[in-house]
Amino acid sequence: MSNQAGLRGRVELLIKPVKDTTDVIVEEKEDGNLRLKFTPKVAGAYSIEVKINGDRLPTCPKTVQAKERELVVVGELKLKFSPGDKPVNFYGIAVNTNGTIVLTDNYGHCIYVFDKNGNCLRKSRGEGSNRGQFWYPNGISFLNDDEVLIADNGNNRIQRLNIQTGTVVKSFGKKGREKGEFGNPIDVTVDNKERIVVTEWGNGRIQVMSKEGESIFTFGDKGPEKLDGPTCCILKKNMFLVSDGGNSCIKAFDQSGTLLYKFGKQGYQDGKFKAPYGLLVDSYNNLLVCDLGNNLVQQFSLDGRFTGKSITRLSQPTAILTAADGRILVTSYDEKKLMERVTSAKQELKSLIKRINLAAEFAENLVQRRSAAGIIQNKHILRQKLEELRGVQVPKHHQATFVKFAAVSQHNFKLGSIQVSEKPAIAAKSTLEGLEKTFQAGVEAKFTLCPQTSGGEVSNFADLEDQVELLITPAKDVTNVTVDEECDGNVRLKFTPKVPGAYSIEVRINGDKLPTCPMTVQVKERELVVVGELKLQLFPGDTIERLSGIAVNTEGQIVVADAFGHYVYVFDKNGNRLRKTGGEGSNTGQFWYPNRISFLNENEVLIADCGNSRIQRFNFQTGTVVKSFGKFGEEKGELNNPVDVTVDDKERIVVTEWGNNRIQVMSKEGESIFTFGDNGPEKLQYPNCCILNKNIFLVSDGGNHCIKAFDPSGTLLYKFGKEGNQDGQFTTPYGLLVDGSNNLLVCDSGNSRVQQFSLDGRFTGKSITHLSKPKVITKAPDGRILVSSHNDKKVYILK
């Protein structure tokens, strides 16, 4: 037996197919042998080859078969309740690093806390809407070891509960569709950036929020692949993975909420779902899905290939997670209970129908008994059930809905079926409201359809939004056309006009045009106004001489550069000073005319240290420089007066070099990838800013007084603007921003204004307040547009 030292370094383990393996490891054991490990991602044949010093073993290559994983139940979490406590339906579960367990009892309207041995430590207050009470609590997640976030479904809010004290630290949200509001939050989790991710079953969307509960963005509720009754969302490897319950599939979205891919469809075969719920990515990067309707847990690779399933029946699994000791825990929802809370008149009606059907089923079973004594014995039970139904009323706000009982026949004792009839809305009686308002280019336009029946009543027809069409012409000049049903039975219609001008609006119900349509509305240029000023509290004795850069992270923390003061300041979201760093110089951590700033991640910023011709990567939490790269020069990797730096969606660093008249694209580590803009007839002259949007580099060409667009390779696509002070003209354009409605905002520094354009360069609006030398423009996580004034040394808020 060989016992040569360092044997591990001379052994190679080669597995094919390479793309389907992970965690390939060679470990040296104490007995001199080597332990070889790998994790196959999917079932199938794998070729194994082992080499020592480049020589292949004689038995290699060897083929092994990896079969589908079989998940088995190996035990049950033993929970010891306090005397008198009887949980009704467990839904959500969370475990902290200490092993403390928190469970939500959905139908019991309460929260239980257990120690790692299953002993009950605490039970929250019961049903209600007061702080600390719950109404059908669902998903739960630890924010830290002492605090949990609870999706208080029925109350349309998230409650942050301290499990040690039993007190609610914070509660946020209310019923609605706007940002910061909820429609039946069914799941809540915390991502690796400490953002709160809420799954809204009722609104059919995912809402990403700050740690303090402020909305950052939403996704999933628009487009052809919009969510229908989502039940869970987790973040893995910069992807949002969502279980789309209504569409019986799993969808993957990128960090901005753009759909990447989906897998699964309705069914009971491997890889198909019936109401997917909880999701978990285990330590081997397997995606585990609670397939509630099929009573099992299925396993997939992250790209959606089926790789295994549970072989033990699990009664309606809803939530799944990994405990601190590596155990996988799954909650089983009692199959005898309702799966969803009755939250609206429509659902209340379904509940009523189900109860009547149950009574009918009981009666049918009763009359089929052969014994008259048996009938008499159970007669009082049937009477009791019917008495319970006698007092039930269809909700009054569903005036156009009624329940019809249709008998089939009597000779076979089938009592019939329950049918729902609803009076539909008709176009001839329906009206539009809100079109008299002033609409602006690049701003979401909203108006209301008031659907009515033939009798002039308000229609509450189910799924009305699916029967309504909103047609806007010219179609090429509109975006974000949506139809949303409101809680009051009306339908909210929205669209965003790209440019000023006349737009024709036509609304149809079931193909029939409203009598007032088509209608023409005029969209005027957008008027950007200053609605406030960012109040920044400096250290005593400090003054900002020239505000040259500003950046805001998703938590709202603000970093500002002072070019002439050679300092960088850090503030919290309320503008309170946290740190001041720098000072004039060329040493690491010092600056010489620092300019624009960009966040690389939540804790680190990139600073264009213009005078020192370098980029400094600064951790503002610790106050230390993590990395510095670049030196004065014209070669790749060298810089000449970098005035702007940003990070694209591929985590590449994009540097605008004012002195070299070019844009340099670099890796995250500061290695040059390519440059563009410094060659050809349309070469840049003193560029001031570059951003990437939809795979297009947009550059403000200060010397040529225009905006230029380049493709991903740096080839010029088009340009717009020229020197002047008219609409669409520039005098030294600086900072650029594409807002949430795909408007391009340009700091027209020499003309002391901000101009707005469509992405193809058509002028659509401007600021109507004088802004003295605006240089930088950015967006805060709450949607505010921030503009720095070079001369006024202020940060203005635009709307």
Image (cartoon, rainbow, N blue to C red):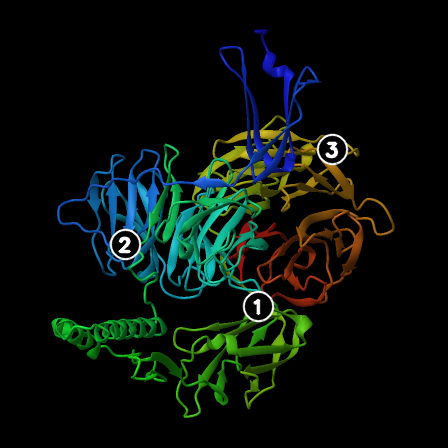
User: Residues under labels 3 and 2: Cα distance?
Assistant: 61 Å
Q: Amino acid under label 1?
A: Val
Whichever of callouts 1 and 2 sits on the residue coming sooner in the sequence is 2
Residue 663 seen: yes
In what element is the residue under mark 3?
Answer: loop
Q: Residues within 10 Å of mark 1 (few under 14, many from 20)?
A: some
Q: Amino acid under label 3?
A: Gly
Q: Residues within 10 Å of mark 3 (few under 14, many from 20)?
A: many
Q: Amino acid under label 2?
A: Asn
In which quadrant of the rendered image does the N terminus lie?
top right
Left or right: 353 in relation to 49:
left
| Residue 759 locus on image (x, y percent) | 69, 61
Whichever of callouts 1 and 3 sits on the residue coming sooner in the sequence is 1
**Quarter location, residue 180:** bottom left
User: Residues under labels 1 and 3: Cα distance?
Assistant: 41 Å
| Residue 5 locus on image (x, y percent) | 58, 8
Kindly identify which residue carries mark 1: 443
In what element is the residue under mark 2?
Answer: loop
Q: Are marks 3 and 2 in contact (CB under 8 Å)?
A: no
**Closest to the observer, 472 or 200:** 200
Q: Residue furthest right?
A: 681
- Number of numbered discs visible in the structure rendering: 3
Kindly identify which residue carries mark 3: 637
Q: Are marks 1 and 3 in contact (CB under 8 Å)?
A: no
User: Residues under labels 1 and 2: Cα distance?
Assistant: 45 Å
Q: Residue furthest bottom?
A: 455
Figure check: 110 above or below 61 = below
Left or right: 620 in relation to 164:
right
